[in-house]
Amino acid sequence: MDESAIVSMEVFNAMSREDQITALCDYHECNKKKRVLHREQYVVKRWNPHPPTRFVDWWLSAGVKQTEDETDRLWRGVTPVVAFNSEAVREVYSQAKSLGIA
């Protein structure tokens, strides 16, 4: 990961979706082929191939269990990328953030 490619959330949120995925791929050092795929996923399909580190940390620690408890569905084995792009998981994550536990 290229730490020099980090942009503030304020700047990131002001960017177009095209610029956002470029910034994310810069940080994750995606090759040209992946950048094309990621742009299609992010801009056209509204799928984020690069979930935030804070989300990934939460998902891999308490997130799976919290989401299973809240949704009465099994989430074990679901990758952070798939989880981040699930509305049910995002709702649990948002609640956990608002309570200060994520």
Image: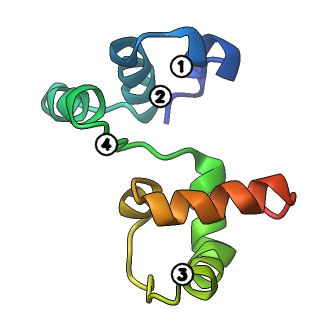
The kind of residue on which mark 3 rests is: Thr
Q: Are marks 1 and 4 in contact (CB under 8 Å)?
A: no
Spatial CA span between label 3 and label 2 = 33 Å
Cβ atoms under marks 3 and 4 closer than 8 Å: no
Tell me the kind of residue under disc 2: Tyr
Label 3 belongs to which residue?
A: 71
For label 2, the residue is: 27
Instruction: Judge depth for marks 1 and 4 and give the one in front.
Output: 4
SS for callout 2: helix
Identified by mark 4, the residue type is Trp
Question: Between marks 3 and 4, how big is the CA–CA gap?
Answer: 21 Å
Q: Are marks 2 and 1 in contact (CB under 8 Å)?
A: yes
Q: Nearer the viewer, residue 20 or 97?
A: 97
> Mark 1 or 3, which is nearer the eye?
3
Question: Is 22 left, or right, of 96 in this rendering?
Answer: left
Q: Quadrant of residue 93?
A: bottom right
Secondary structure at badge 3 equals helix
Residue labelled with disc 4: 47
Q: Quadrant of the C terminus?
A: bottom right
Foreground label between 2 and 4 = 4
